[in-house]
């Protein structure tokens, strides 16, 4: 990267999570990093780690991605920090819903959409103007193979529906932003070995999921971080509006 830019990453709080691994990958690659999470202290701890380990500017802060005032407050904090121009937004924050459809509530449905879909909208909208003004921008949104194949991994109908909305948002925004040079892509991950999965499934379910993966394993957080890094790079400047499958061959379309 010839010019240092700042990456905004949501959902960085979990110790064995995609967001944290991705933050370390971008810091290693020389980006300034802003890590945001509902757990503010965890995000601040991450920022300290990034600065010590990689020697890059780093800021951690609290945000509720589903709340516009919270997102705008985070944007103001970033602006006041004097970091390099924002060059990428990675919408990783999300929640799942392993609840059978008839057991769901409207409250659950709305919360899953608020975090996964509305959060993606709010954070992107908050930081997009700076990328347009700076002449470089990458938006990468976290979707799921569940959106493509109709569940079947962990999250059920509310989660699959919200992640499908993320794909639609990605495609439409990519088309709209094409003339600006800003690219917008989504990552549809299959099963990933994270704390969220470890705490929410059973060994039997995990074994059955892996049995359906041609590569014979779940993705690692490093696998996902590497794809985020490529899609945010200058080399990916002609890739936009895509949904990148990262599932070991479990869903091929």
Image (cartoon, helix red, strand yellow):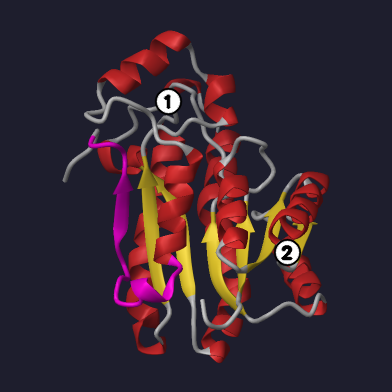
Residue 12 located left or right of residue 145: right
* Residue 245 forms part of the magenta stretch: yes
The span picked out in magenta is 232-249
Cβ–Cβ under 8 Å for marks 2 and 1? no
Secondary element under disc 2, as helix, strand or loop, is loop
Residue 9, horizontal then vertical, whole percent: 61, 59
Residue 156, horizontal then vertical, whole percent: 42, 30
Q: Is residue 45 visible in the rendered structure shown here?
A: yes
Number of marks in the image? 2
Q: Residue at position x 49%, y 25% from top?
A: 98
Decide whether the magenta segment is chiefly helix, strand or loop: loop
Secondary element under disc 1, as helix, strand or loop, is helix
Query: Does residue 102 lie above or below 148 as drawn?
Result: above
Q: Residue at position x 56%, y 77% from top?
A: 128
Dot 1: within a 10 Å radius of its alpha carbon, few (fewer than 14), some, or many (20 or more) residues? few
**Quarter location, residue 144:** top left
Dot 2: within a 10 Å radius of its alpha carbon, few (fewer than 14), some, or many (20 or more) residues? some
Q: Which mark is residue 101?
A: 1
Q: Is residue 62 visible in the rendered structure shown here?
A: no
Q: Residue at position x 38%, y 52% from top?
A: 187
Whichever of callouts 2 and 1 sits on the residue coming sooner in the sequence is 2
Residue nearest the observer in this picture, 50 or 92:
50
Cα distance between the residues tagged 2 and 1: 47 Å
Query: Does residue 158 lie above or below 184 as drawn?
Result: above
* Residue 101 forms part of the magenta stretch: no
Q: Which mark is residue 55?
A: 2
**Quarter location, residue 13:** top right
Q: Nearer the viewer, mark 2 or mark 1?
A: 2
Query: Does residue 163 lie above or below 241 as drawn?
Result: above
Q: Residue at position x 73%, y 47% from top?
A: 38
Residue 225, horizontal then vertical, whole percent: 48, 51
């Amino acid at each position: 990267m010839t010019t240092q830019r700042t990456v905004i990453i949501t959902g960085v709080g979990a110790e064995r999570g995609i967001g944290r691994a991705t933050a370390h990958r971008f810091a290693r690659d020389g980006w300034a990093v802003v890590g945001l999470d509902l757990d503010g202290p965890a995000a601040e701890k991450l920022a300290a780690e990034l600065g010590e380990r990689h020697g890059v500017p780093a800021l951690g802060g609290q945000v509720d991605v589903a709340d516009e005032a919270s997102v705008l407050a985070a944007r103001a904090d970033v602006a006041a920090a004097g970091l390099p121009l924002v060059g990428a937004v990675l919408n990783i924050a999300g929640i799942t819903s392993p609840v059978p459809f008839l057991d769901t509530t409207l409250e659950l449905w709305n919360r899953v959409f608020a975090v996964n879909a509305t959060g993606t909208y709010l954070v992107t909208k908050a930081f997009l103007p700076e990328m347009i003004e700076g002449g470089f921008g990458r938006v990468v949104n976290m979707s799921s193979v569940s959106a493509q194949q109709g569940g079947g991994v962990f999250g059920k109908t509310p989660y699959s529906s919200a992640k499908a909305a993320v794909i639609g948002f990605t495609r439409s925004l990519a088309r709209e932003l094409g003339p600006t040079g800003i690219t917008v892509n989504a990552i549809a991950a299959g099963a990933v070995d994270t704390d969220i999965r470890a705490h929410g499934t059973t060994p039997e379910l995990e074994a059955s999921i892996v049995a359906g993966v041609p590569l014979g394993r779940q993705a690692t957080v490093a696998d996902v971080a590497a794809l985020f890094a490529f899609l945010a790079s200058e080399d990916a400047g002609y890739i936009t509006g895509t949904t990148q499958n990262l599932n070991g061959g479990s869903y091929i379309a």
